[in-house]
């Protein structure tokens, strides 16, 4: 399955329209099946669970947005091993080329030679164990809305509602991050199942695709 344009300007991306597309893009790294078919956490990855990575507004633990592509790849490959997917695609009319690299349920984006964003979600092929990567506040995939709101309180804002796999999903942002208008730094994501009883299905950070076109 070929990756779609990750350009957030028009759609996700209208998850990543709003960038839902981020969350549900049938890019090659995302599986086109409902959450009910995705298995629960499998075994932990080799080494430290989560490889010591943290979902952060400025990057992933030891690697930060804007850092050189070669340095980011060296660090993450040392922590996670070889990626299961590595490809490039155009980013909109004027955005140039984006490189997408995936390990299990984590995909990073690199544009213009530097690390520009990431997406961690449950809609990925089960080709490797799902990594239990969380935010610095301990919130990870499948966290309930109650856990999300209890942790972030007024720092959390609901910003978008999109369709995915026939279901409505709600986008959220933390500390002003807007999933419909991604910024160079920041953290947000998507919840499936409603703003009362739903669970987190996607986290996204930064601006994976910068389309400079009209």
Image (tube, rainbow, N blue to C red):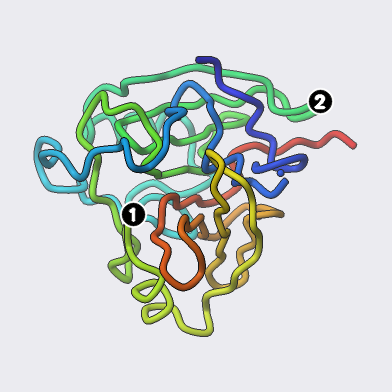
x and y percentages locating residue 58 in the rendered image: 48, 57
* Tag 1 secondary structure: loop
Q: Indicate which disc residue 47 carries.
A: none
Could you say whether the residue bearing mark 2 is in a helix, strand or loop? loop
**Residue 141 in the image: above or below residue 120:** below
Q: Is residue 16 visible?
A: no
- Within 10 angstroms of label 2, few (less than 14), some, or many (20 or more) residues? few
What residue would you read off at disc 1? 141
Describe residue 214's horizontal placement relative to residue 24 as left or right: right
- Residue under the point 61% across and 40% down: 21
Residue position marked by numbered label 2 in the rendering: 93
| Residue displayed at 66% across by 27% down | 5
Q: Is residue 173 above or below residue 99?
A: below
- Residue under the image location 47 percent in, 58 percent down: 191
Residue 20 horizontal side relative to residue 8, left or right: left
The residue shown at (74%, 30%) is 95
Q: Position of residue 17 (x, y in %)?
A: 73, 45
Q: Position of residue 175 (x, y in %)?
A: 56, 73
Q: Choose between 119 and 25: the one closer to the eye.
A: 25
Tell which residue pokes out farthest to the bottom in this image: 154
In the displayed structure, 46 sits above or below 148; it is above
């Amino acid at each position: 399955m070929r990756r779609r344009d990750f350009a957030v300007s028009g759609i996700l991306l209208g998850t990543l329209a709003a960038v839902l597309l981020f969350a549900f893009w049938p890019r090659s790294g995302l599986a086109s099946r409902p959450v009910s078919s995705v298995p629960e956490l499998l075994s932990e990855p080799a080494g430290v669970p989560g490889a010591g990575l943290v979902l952060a507004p400025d990057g992933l633990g030891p690697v930060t947005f804007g850092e050189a592509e070669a340095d980011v790849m060296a660090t993450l490959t040392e922590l996670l091993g070889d990626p299961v997917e590595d490809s490039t695609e155009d980013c909109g009319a004027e955005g140039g080329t984006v490189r997408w690299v995936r390990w299990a349920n984590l995909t990073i984006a690199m544009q213009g030679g530097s690390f520009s964003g990431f997406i961690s979600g449950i809609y990925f092929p089960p080709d490797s164990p799902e990594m239990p990567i969380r935010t610095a506040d301990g919130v990870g995939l499948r966290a309930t809305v109650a856990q999300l709101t209890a942790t972030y309180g007024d720092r959390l804002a609901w910003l978008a509602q999109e369709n995915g796999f026939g279901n409505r999903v709600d986008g959220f942002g933390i500390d002003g991050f807007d999933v419909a208008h991604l910024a160079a730094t920041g953290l947000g994501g998507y919840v499936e199942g409603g703003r009362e009883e739903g669970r987190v299905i996607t986290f996204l950070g930064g601006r994976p695709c910068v389309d400079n076109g009209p």
